[in-house]
Image (spheres, rainbow, N blue to C red):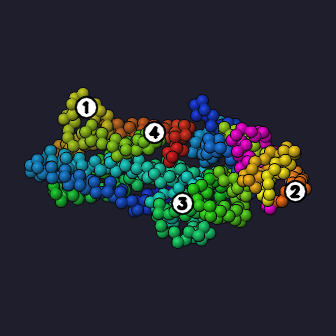
Amino acid sequence: MNTVLEVKALTKDYGSFRAVDDITFSIKEGEIVGLLGPNGAGKTTTIQMLLDLITPSSGEIRYFGKPFPKEREYCLSRINFASAYTHVQSRMTVIQNLRIYAGLYAVAQADKKVEELLDLLEIRELAKELFWHLSSGQKTRVILAKALLSNPQLLLMDEPTASLDPDIAKKTVELIQTLQKKEGVSMLYTSHNMEEVERLCDRVIFLDHGRIVAEDTPLGLTKRVGTSRLIITFDGPQKPVVRYLERLKYTHVFVRPQMVEIEVSDNDIPKALFGLSNDGVWLTDIEVKKPGLEDVFLSIAGGNYEHTTA
Amino acid sequence: MSTQRLKIVLIHSWYHFWHSPETWVDLFWNPALQLWVYALIALSFGQEGDARGLYVVVGMIFWQIIWVGEYAITVGALWEIWSKSFSSMFISPLSMEEFVVGQMISGTVKSFLAVAMTAFIAYWLYHFSIFTIGWMLPIYYAELLVFSWATGFVILSLIFRYSTQVQSLSWALIFLVQPLGAVFYPVTILPESIRWIAYALPSTYVFETMRKQLTGGAIDWHALGVGSVVNIVWFVICWIIFQYTYKAAKRSGAFARLEA
């Protein structure tokens, strides 16, 4: 697979403060890479350097093998960007905005492409509405249409679902998945919604204090944060439950008098369940919570994560 | 510089203008009212053709070129910043130079409309025809337009450097040219200690030459020539400041924070 984006030793200093510290990564054709990290980790600065809105202090960016921003026009005509925080002109209608961006990207058969996107993103009825009259969800769809106008080979997305209702956010993620499958677009995706990232991304890069602290598949990353959580609801007194858990030294907490959350490795889950049952505990409900990217995120934000890349 | 993208910036400017009544007020309503008042003040000076009245009316008509040319560049950019669409434009293949040149052309068209309207009011109320300036009209026009672009570059540079907290300079700073650039009166009216400022502004030479011409004197080609040289120097310096500030704002992150 060809490399669509190659970033080498990218660094950004603001005086004595280093916002992005010597990061190196690449994105292959058709790949969706998540860029995650706590606030101030350097995600937005990285994306802004990738778009030539901020000049890096040092390092190298190459799109499709061409140096950026030296080959600015070549590169920018092949990538696009969508963000919840960047809009189109609010005093123009949706269709006027789309026509303008189609012109800026020199889209072939622009009118046909605009029509296609109006249908694909279900915004045809909004075509003649001024952008500032739209709701957040509608604006997001227009921004996505703008981002897709140029048939980009790489799409940079900075929290595209931020400030959306959960149902609209879900629809947006589904749409992004569909587009990726249909068009094979590569993506660099940032979000604070870990579920979304787990669902979309082939690979995740974690940034903290401007540095890459972890890089792996979502599954690979979650495997590194240890135990699952077993949530058991039972009938009867707490005493036998406490006795059993203390005997086996499981870390646990009672969420309610008859509900306990136990930290346990995946292999120990059957043992814990049978053990409790054999000790006469009547189990009425069992839930296993596997570690997710959120746990990785919290672990990194808390400084407990082992810094490794796959 | 892509002519295709320049064309798109102009269409963008037209779409925006059409949907923004505030711009109509700034470009037409305010100048119309000002010209109305100034023409009546001119009449109060005495007979039509009185030099003082003529200076005021002509000054106000040609002031529109400076005002609208500068306004198109700075407020054109501000509208994008307010919309949070400025960065969207520059992550496309559009360059800053193309955007600015587009605003310069758009400003030229808008200034034609503003001048035509104020010239009409001047003719109606004061019976002054702008065409009495004759073939010097396009020369004066071009000189003032170039000066307006240059001031637009500097004010836009200040916005890039200090963000929207200095946005009111887009409306306010240019008005310094009115008293200092002797738009409505001869330079000799200014205190001697600040006349050098007037002579550092290219517009002064245009208004001085125009006043002389309209009151029956010969065209002062020497003054106009000096004014053109000052204009070119002014334009080049302002363009260099603009380019430098734009690059510095990208280095400091101020450019990316404009929409914050």
Circles 4 and 2 in contact, beta carbons < 8 Å: no
Amino acid type of the residue that numbered disc 1 sits on in the rendered structure: Arg
The chain containing the residue under callout 1 comes to B
Disc 4 from disc 2: Cα separation: 72 Å
* Boundaries of the magenta span: A284-310
Local secondary structure at mark 3: helix
| Marked residue nearer the N-terminal end (3 or 2) | 3
The residue wearing badge 1 is B195
**Residue B143 occupies which quadrant of the picture?**
top left
Q: Position of residue A275 (x, y in %)?
A: 89, 53
The residue wearing badge 4 is B162
Disc 1 from disc 4: Cα separation: 30 Å
The chain containing the residue under callout 3 comes to A
The chain containing the residue under callout 4 comes to B
Disc 3 from disc 2: Cα separation: 54 Å
Circles 1 and 4 in contact, beta carbons < 8 Å: no
Report the side of B194 relative to A136 (left or right): left
The residue wearing badge 2 is A280
Circles 1 and 2 in contact, beta carbons < 8 Å: no
The chain containing the residue under callout 2 comes to A
Amino acid type of the residue that numbered disc 4 sits on in the rendered structure: Tyr
Q: Which mark is residue B187?
A: none
Local secondary structure at mark 4: helix
Depth order, front residue of A213/B136: A213
Q: Residue at x 14, y 45 (%)?
A: B51
Q: Position of residue A278 (x, y in %)?
A: 90, 56
Local secondary structure at mark 1: helix
Up-down relation of residue A154 to residue A57 (above or below): below
